Amino acid sequence: MDGFKKRLKASIQLRLSWALALAIVGVAVAAGAFSFVSAFDDAQELQDDLLYQIASLVKQRDVAFTGDSRLYRLEDRDHDSTVFVELLGPNASTVTAAGTATADPLPAALALGLHTVESKDGALRVLVTPLGNGDKAAVAQTTRARDEVALNNALRTLLPFFVLVPILLIVVAHLVRQMLRPITDLSEDVDRRSQNDLTALPEDGVPVEVRPFVGAINGLLARVAEAIRTQRRFIADAAHELRSPLTALSLQAERLEHSDMSAPARARLHDLRGGIERNRALLSQLLSLSRAEHGADPAGGPVPVQRVFRRVLEDLLPLAKAKRIDLGVTDASDVNVGVGELDLATLVKNLVDNAIRYTPAGGRVDLSAMATTDGAALRVADTGPGIPVSERERVFDPFYRILGSEQFGSGLGLSIVKTITDRLGARVELEYTDPARHAGLSVTVTFPSPTPARHD
């Protein structure tokens, strides 16, 4: 019961449906009560009219009560409808006639007019009318027939309510659900959006009462989008502004290396050049992240994955040779992916660069691509330490690095990959290259609707 109350309090649709249902049931009950009262009044009026008519006939016909009989019975096939005419007054016999309406005679002191008298056989409706000789005649009939007529009339009136009210409740619930359907569709549309989709919500088909709320949400989305654009512009501008000073520092350090200096000074210069190169790599990844978030690379025609692999290998092969890492493509089959070539190259380059950095010297980094039933997949697998399952959600956060890692990095590589895949509608999965030893990292990116490459 508490759970239902919570749902009732939280759901406008449920509250509206219940309010309308209670209103309908309340109106039906009130209509039934009014119908029964009206039918009862009509039946009572009809019975009273019948008693008046019989009393008028008794007076006109001058019915004589003789002997010990003080009662006339106007029989009917329905015993409850039988009318009794009984003599009241000084001339009435003191002997009760057989078959009277009640075991006790009617009180002689009944005043003229209509009365309801209780008897052992039930309630009697009695009309007392004067006779010409000074006596009074009582015309009586049980109220059972009247009550039965009233009940039957009320039931006939209520029968349509009993049939139509459940149907009406179902129709009302359906109509409420349909009227609130635009709000449900709007919520489903918002729920399907990616975290980077801050476009305004459509107001077409939204009820007028909800449009101010939708407008407020659109205003909030616009402000959030502007704040994010400002942040991204700041990162991009800062990265651009810092590139020139770092390039100048790198050139000066390179020139300084050709000067005569002691061994400790040369070692410190080597550390300085390493720090400058790491900062240059960080700026380059910040710019890549900014481009990936802005989505500046429009999707062109189908891009062969192998061509992108070759470009990435040419750029990163020197880094792999410096660590004696076997870097290559294990699957020569090609597939085409309908995304921008710059996006695909940035994605693959960050995956391969990340694999080279975290793979120990003498290790292996393999690239492959394949066409699947539900998409085109490319995979980058290495023989490094891998990523524990508990860390696989957080490694996509910007600047997040696993504790205990001895490699220097910015923590932006996988974040750039995740940003690009989310924008392109792709799916990225992390697994162990060697599940038995929990070693190595295999990153698989699946793109929807692959187009097989054509070989002429």
Image (tube, grey):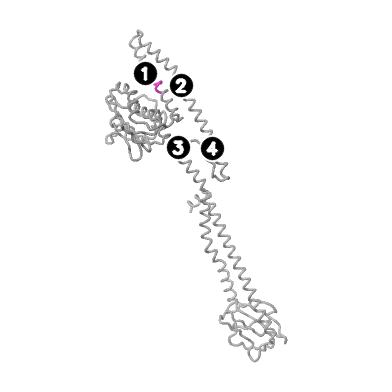
Please, is residue 209 above or below residue 400 in the view?
below
Query: Tag 1: residue type?
Result: Gly
Label 1: how many residues lie within 10 Å, few (<14), some (14-19) or many (20+)?
few
Q: Residues within 10 Å of mark 4 (few under 14, many from 20)?
A: some
Name the residue beneath numbered marker 4: 218
User: Disc 3 or 1, which lies upstream in sequence?
Assistant: 3
Q: CA distance from mark 1 to mark 2?
A: 20 Å
Q: Is residue 372 visible?
A: yes
Q: Residue furthest front?
A: 456
Q: CA distance from mark 3 to mark 1?
A: 38 Å
> Could you tell whether 246 is left or right of 324 in the image?
right
- Amino acid at pointer 3: Ser
Q: Nearer the viewer, residue 72 or 317?
A: 317
The residue identified by callout 2 is: 240
Label 3: few (<14), some (14–19) or many (≥20) C-alpha neighbours in 10 Å = few
Q: Where is residue 310, by image quadrant?
A: top left
What kind of element bears circle 1?
helix
Q: Are marks 1 and 4 in contact (CB under 8 Å)?
A: no
